[in-house]
Image (cartoon, helix red, strand yellow):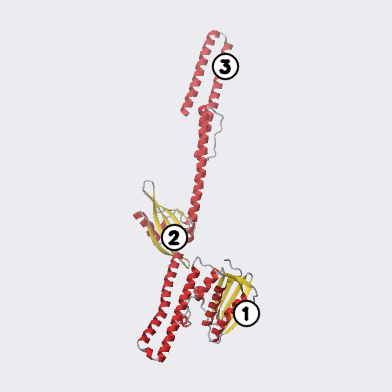
Amino acid sequence: MMKKLFSRALFSYVLGIFVLLIVSGVILNQVVSNYVVLIAVLLTVYIVLLLMLLHVFDKYIKPIKKATKTVGKLVEGNYRARMHHPSYGSIGELSSRINQLARNLSELSIHEQMQSEQLATVFDNTVSGLVHIDQKGYIHLVNRKFLTMFGKKAKDYKGYLYYEVIPNEKIHETVQKAFLYEENVKESITHYKGIDKFYLEIVGAPIFNDRNMLKGAVLVIYDITEMKKLELTRKDFVANVSHELKTPITSIKGFSETLLDGAMDDEEARQKFIRIIYKESQRLQLLIEDLLTLSKLEKEEFQLNIVEVDVKQLLQDITPIMQSKAAKKNINVTINIDSDSTVKIDEDRVKQVILNLLDNAISYTPEDGNITLQVDEVRDQLHIRVSDTGIGIEQEALPRIFERFYRIDKARSRNTGGTGLGLAIAKHIVDVHDGKITVDSKVNEGTTFDVYLPKETAI
């Protein structure tokens, strides 16, 4: 188009000169003798030529320069640049097209920026760690989750070879296999961050271009720590349940066989074995009831039966049972109630919490010991404290005492007749009330449990 415009301008210029020369020739032939007229004619020709050149410059050269300048700004990335020139014809069309191109580029730039921000947001806020590695092994991108898992900053990874900055051989093998086999590779690793232990699953996925050529790989790192812990808990639970069920069943079976083999005729042995069978079957029944209670509490559809309860009446229903049991070990039970109000709770479940804590205190408090049940109000919460002068709990065992079947001294715990589920049940009940239970203990000095329940539990 530039050549076409220049050709038109040159043609107009030559044509004008040709016409002026003809006119000048005619005039010169007629007035050759008049020197003044000749100068006037030459001056006229010069002025006309100058005016024509100015016209060509203003109409063609100047807009072309503006167009070139505008296109230059667009090339530099300034999509807000526009060409402003009152032109018509081809130049006007060129100006209009350049402005339209600038608007389109501006819209594309805005759209691309939005997509880039959205992609960056998704990439950075993904719950899994992500690492982009090119075909040469250099890291291009790492997201926030990856940095949380492995520490350091993004600048410590970007632009470096993956095996230089990620200190884990399993991850190196995953990347190498993804490049070598050109397919997804999955590995599991154990990762330590300080004293904390994490279980991670690594997936290496190769990246291909449109021509199916390998261009790099993406590492996806899943934190499966909670899943692993649940799996270990499930295995421990199954093992513990099996063991707890096996012990009474073995006793019942063994003594039953002994009776059937002839001990039935011995009155003393018969009475002794029947008492043992009864005791073990009772223990088995308690274990099954506690397991069913735990199962019910853990169901998503479990609903509390919230009613308005008088605090003093609640404790009056409980204390006779516990005082009778404590009296057999000559343990003194002191009850202090500093609350006259009513609370909205699941009465039966809260009774179970208090009974479990008192029963636990009686079981692990030696004869002639003391147990205190304190009930008061702390702001908008009902506070229940059960403290004893028992054998206490070692500090390292405190975080685990609410686990199912966890026993500090397994032999001694079984002799108390407990199922190992009492504290786990108590904690579940407190949790579904949106409350809190804490423990403080010192070996050979005693243990204190504090329970905090909202005075108005949400249904």
How far is disc 3 from disc 1 in space, using C-alphas? 124 Å
Up/down of 385 relative to 132, above or below:
below
Which residue in the structure is indicated by mark 3? Answer: 44
Residue 174, by quadrant, is bottom left
Inspect this view and state whether residue 410 appears: no
* Residue 292 image offset from top left, x and y in percent: 47, 73
* Residue 437 image offset from top left, x and y in percent: 55, 72
How far is disc 3 from disc 2 in space, using C-alphas? 88 Å
* Residue 411 image offset from top left, x and y in percent: 45, 81
Up/down of 60 relative to 405, above or below:
above
Image quarter where the C terminus lies is bottom right
Which residue in the structure is indicated by mark 1? Answer: 336
Residue at image point 40% right, 82% down? 252
Residue 235, by quadrant, is bottom left
Q: Which mark is residue 222?
A: 2
Mark 1: amino acid: Asn
How far is disc 2 from disc 1 in space, using C-alphas? 52 Å
From the viewer's perspective, tell me whether residue 388 is left or right of residue 207: right
Q: For label 3, count other residues whose C-alpha is less than 10 Å away and answer few (under 14), some (14-19) or many (20+).
A: some
* Residue 35 image offset from top left, x and y in percent: 57, 11
Residue at image point 50% right, 52% down? 121
